[in-house]
Image: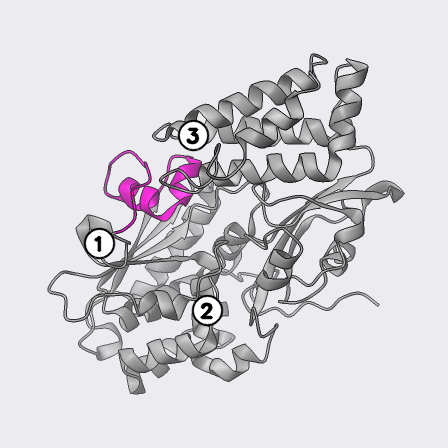
Amino acid sequence: MSLEEKRILLREMGKKDGASIKVYEKGGGYKALKKVLKGMSPEEVKEEVTKARIRGRGGAGFEAGRKWGFLPKDTDKPIYLACNADESEPGTFKDRHIMEHCPHRLVEGCIITCYAIGAKAGYIYIRGEFPHAQRAVEKALDEAREKNYLGEKILGTDHDIDIWVHTGAGAYVCGEETGMLSSIEGGRGNPKLKPPFPAVEGLFKCPTIVNNVETLANVPFVITDGADAFLALGTEDTPGTRVFCVSGHVEKPGVFEFECGVSLKDVIDAAGGVWKGKKLKAVVPGGASAPIITADEVDIPCDFGSMAKAGTIMGSCAIMVMDEDTSIPHMLLNVMEFFAHESCGQCTPCREGTGWVKKIVKRICDGGGKPEDLDKLVAIATSYEGMGGLTICGLSDAAAWPVQSYIKKFRHEFEALIESGQKATAGAAD
């Protein structure tokens, strides 16, 4: 029996004109906003979202309501909302699908969030390589303005709220919240030291809440159906649903929405299982930076706590499946070429470490590996001695985790390549 999806965030996907305001309203869209404006104070909205414990869907898993609570009280500065729609993590395409197929769910979530935090302006920062998503969101914003869901005195109230799209230029570091804010301000998208955190001093040096697309898209459901309905889904550790993006060596790659806590193995099976009748070799469960797990470890619940106990991360729920013919050393080379290219270069451990690791792994894959290379790679990627824990943002740590886990779980493949002195073939990794 196939696993049944629980579509809340992707409810409009697959419907004719599903991205239109007409279809969204027909399915109950903007009822949450009307409910808020007619009878809920900003504090009541924040309390409901806090009660629901919506854990950040961008990867970190920090609760949205708690983050909103970090805003300074009685500030005389304007407050901003910044929606992180950069989605730079390799293997991740869930936010793109929400924006392309269900943009009004995101727009409504942004409007309600602005109301709750006292923001009159919000920005949706969309990855530059997502032109279809950009057009879909901009159209949805225009439709919302025509209905007076956005703009001056929305729905006849005294609240002025508007939201604007800002397009990025394709930099991985702009997925980091402070790098994104720098980019919105018109500067180079370099991450900044924290503290101060964005909730205290963010966009234009004003208090700013930064949330992911999927996180904000959950807000209308929480308001319409209540926090208890949200908490009834998923697990105690991670309530609600998640949008899983499954790619790699499966028969039916794509996006799927299931309750949190579903088995990783069942999600892979829902995507048709490993392609061409081959055996499963390994899985990266949360985007390219997530530590790899073996085929014997995939029967684990998909929630933040369970993934952490298994030595990996849930991250962005980007599940990358590898079959038995995949060269793990070559896969690591792919990953490290990406991170070395995307380092902004501010911090020495990241700037030098990513490039150094890439060169060593490439030498191994080219047939020139040395016996001491593996221990050297692990040392470079070790926290507080090499790349980990010593940089402004998390890119260096994100690059270090695959190095540590790939060598730990598949050391024999690297050793065999070094001993043979032969050039690695990517196998199905191509």
Residue 143 is covered by the magenta coloring = no
Looking at the image, which is closer to me, 85 or 65?
Answer: 65
Q: Is residue 115 above or below residue 314?
A: below
- Label 2, secondary structure: give it: helix
Q: Which residue is mark 2?
A: 22
**Kind of residue at disc 2:** Lys
Q: Which residue is mark 3?
A: 349
Q: Tell me which label, 3 or 1, sits earlier in the chain.
A: 1
Name the outermost residue toward the bottom.
39
Mark nearest the camera among 3 and 2 is 3
Q: Tell me which label, 3 or 2, sits earlier in the chain.
A: 2
Q: Quadrant of the N terminus?
A: bottom right
- Asked whether, in this view, residue 233 is left or right of residue 279, the answer is left
Tell me what residue is drawn at x 66 percent, y 67 percent.
261
Can residue 20 be seen here? The reply is: no
- Which stretch did the figure color magenta? 167-195
Tell me what residue is drawn at x 27 percent, y 41 percent.
182
Q: Is residue 388 above or below residue 228?
A: above
What is the number of the mark on residue 393? none
Callouts 3 and 2 close, C-beta under 8 Å: no
- Asked whether, in this view, residue 350 is left or right of residue 117, the answer is right
Looking at the image, which is closer to me, 255 or 203?
Answer: 203
Tell me what residue is drawn at x 17 percent, y 76 percent.
158
Cα distance between the residues tagged 3 and 2: 51 Å
Q: Which residue is mark 1?
A: 201
Task: Locate residue 174, reporting x and y percent.
Answer: 38, 41
Name the outermost residue toward the left.
76
The crowding category of the residue bearing disc 2, from other C-alpha atoms within 10 Å (few below 14, some 14 to 19, many at least 20), is few
